[in-house]
């Protein structure tokens, strides 16, 4: 089963090598790695070119933001399964893609997700937060639940049927697309109960209070644009759920 991994980047020289290496090290035999670069001015492309024999497609040109770049990657993907690995993230070990695909084949599902850890930007072995996603239950989005997007693998046919990322949102298009796929259209979904991604701390929606407020507004917009109504406390419970990631880590 062929898998397309999409990595988008812009001036990511400090981390892109780790991301690529984590894909190169996977023991699944059929991986198509697609890199969409926003026209970096640092050494990002120089580092990418060191791995040119392992990269199926490289596009480097200005884009309209991270979600526009992801859509470009989806358009190039030829794998039956599509995963997205951010340029400052890395897979936890060499068995990640193998385990994900084994679950797709066993359950004949449309999507798979797993757990994620936030790690120190310099020392990726140092865990700051543990995002244990847990098994999805219908209606969980109304309770503030969502799976970690970097762990979300989905059949390419689902994008073709239900659409790509909306570029109208600047920081919550990943939330919107999972809300659309999972909650609204109820794709068949299976949980892989283990950590598969190490995510460097400092995501776009969390780097400042201002960005967190904007992300919360976009979360609400995601429900509206899908013709859905969140629960009374949905938009409060979603960011609050992250507090428990710190609490669980400390136990």
Image: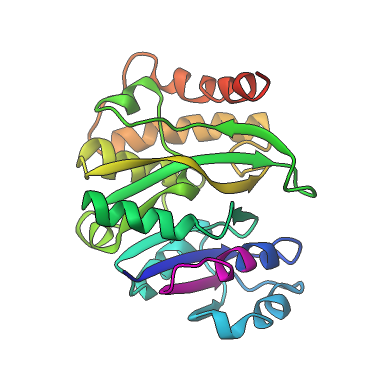
Residue drawn at x 48%, y 81% is 56
Front in this rendered view, residue 175 or 197: 197
The magenta segment is 21-36
Q: Splitting the image into 4 quarters, where does residue 99 fall?
A: bottom left
Residue drawn at x 24%, y 57% is 158
Within the magenta stretch, is there residue 150?
Answer: no
- Left or right of residue 89, residue 230 in this image: left
Rendered-image quadrant of the N terminus: bottom left
Q: Is residue 109 visible?
A: no
Within the magenta stretch, is there residue 30?
Answer: yes
- Left or right of residue 174, residue 198 in this image: right
Residue drawn at x 59%, y 51% is 92
Question: Does 49 appear above or below 237?
Answer: below
Question: Does 183 appear above or below 42?
Answer: above
Q: Splitting the image into 4 quarters, where does residue 228 fall?
A: top left
- Left or right of residue 175, residue 86 in this image: right
């Amino acid at each position: 089963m062929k898998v397309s991994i999409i990595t988008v980047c812009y001036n990511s020289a400090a981390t892109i090598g780790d991301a690529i290496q984590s894909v190169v090290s996977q023991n699944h035999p059929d991986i198509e790695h697609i890199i969409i670069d926003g026209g970096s001015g640092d050494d990002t492309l120089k580092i990418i070119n060191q791995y040119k024999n392992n990269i199926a497609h490289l596009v480097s040109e200005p884009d309209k933001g991270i979600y526009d770049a992801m859509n470009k990657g989806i358009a190039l993907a030829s794998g039956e399964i599509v995963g997205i690995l951010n340029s400052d993230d890395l897979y936890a070990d060499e068995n990640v893609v193998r385990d994900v695909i084994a679950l797709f084949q066993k359950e004949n599902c449309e999507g798979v997700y797993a757990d994620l850890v936030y790690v120190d930007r310099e020392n990726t072995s140092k865990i700051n937060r543990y995002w244990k996603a847990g098994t999805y239950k219908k209606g969980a989005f109304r309770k503030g639940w969502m799976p970690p997007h970097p762990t979300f693998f989905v059949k390419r046919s689902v994008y073709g049927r239900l659409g790509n990322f909306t570029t109208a949102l600047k920081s919550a298009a990943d939330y919107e697309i999972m809300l659309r796929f999972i909650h609204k259209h109820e794709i068949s979904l299976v949980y892989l109960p283990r950590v598969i991604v190490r995510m460097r701390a400092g995501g776009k929606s969390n780097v400042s209070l201002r960005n967190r407020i904007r992300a919360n507004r976009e979360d609400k917009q995601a429900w509206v644009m899908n013709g859905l109504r969140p629960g009374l406390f949905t938009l409060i419970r979603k960011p609050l759920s992250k507090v428990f990631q710190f609490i669980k880590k400390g136990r």
